[in-house]
Image (spheres, rainbow, N blue to C red):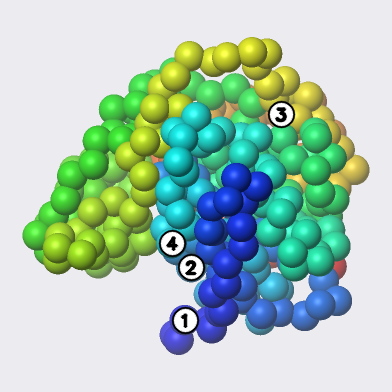
Amino acid sequence: MAEPAFTESKWESGDGLGLRYRDYTGPDTKPPLLCLHGLTRNARDFEPLAERFAGEWRLIVPDMRGRGQSEYAREAASYRARSYIDDVVRLLGQLDCGPVVAVGTSMGGMIAMLMAQARAWPLAGAVLNDIGPDLEAAGIERIRGYVGQGGNFETWMHAARHLREQAHAAHPDFAIGDWLAYAKRVMVMTGNGRIAFDYDMKIAEEFNAPSDGEPFDLWGALRALAGIPTLALRGELSDLLSAATVAKMQAELPGLKAVTVPRVGHPPTLAEPQAQQAIADLLAEVA
């Protein structure tokens, strides 16, 4: 199957960073899908979703600051939710978008909830991919163990084998071809011919920093999604989002639909048939 075509363009952050995004064309009669990736990911993370929905829906897929083709931040302290929200709002304003359906994986889902709470941009729907207001300590510690650690590899096969060692528990059914595809989404060929992770290692500084000021009211952020179609996806093997938290999310946000994606951990890739069908069902409510 041929990969769907997209244009790649740029926008500028409030602090002058050059940021990049993918724009997969779709009808202007439906709200675009705003695809927000996770902590160490980039726009390539949504290629499986684009393969399923591009053309039927427009997809706007930013590389957040410090990831992919977007410029790295000058100050590590700007790798935080408020900066990401401001960046996204500037992009949507440049595109003169109306309401969007936010599809957020992990950190991207957190951004979506906080955008709703701040009323930063009107949302027509939301997909929260393996993220919620409460996160499990085991998952947080696992992420702390690898974020910002760097590393580079001689070949794509070496990179794929490294990812298999690191993340086998999350994707026990992956074959080596799946790990190669995964590597090509999260890594990039560098100028010296080595293969390395495609994000600014300084992201770890803010992720690991003690919280300053008032913490976010994440349960309030979830409740801010009231009145729009909302889907919570959870990987059956996730160590970050528990089934108990999803049940509480449904109690706090009446109408929230929850789907468990079998045989996958944090986060589902959105290539899974169950994930794609759940998103299709949600979009049928939006259209």
Three-letter code, disc 1:
Glu
Secondary structure type for disc 4? loop
Residue highlighted by disc 1: 3
Q: Which mark is residue 249?
A: 3
The quadrant of the image that shows the C terminus is bottom right
Q: Quadrant of the N terminus?
A: bottom left
Is residue 108 visible in this depiction of the protein? yes
| Residue at 71 percent of width and 37 percent of height | 113
Sequence-first tag of 4 and 3: 4
For label 2, the SS is helix
Q: CA distance from mark 4 to mark 3?
A: 34 Å
Q: Is residue 196 left or right of residue 231?
A: left
- Residue 243 x %, y %: 57, 29
Q: Which residue corresponds to mark 2?
A: 47
Q: Are marks 1 and 2 in contact (CB under 8 Å)?
A: yes
Residue 99 pos. (x, y %): 84, 58
C-alpha distance separating marks 3 and 1: 35 Å
Closest to the camera, between mark 3 and mark 2, is 2
For label 2, the crowd category at 10 Å Cα-Cα, with few meaning under 14, some 14 to 19 and many 20 or more, is: some
Q: Position of residue 225 (x, y in %)?
A: 81, 39
Amino acid found under the numbered disc labelled 2: Glu
The amino acid type, in three-letter code, at marker 3 is: Met
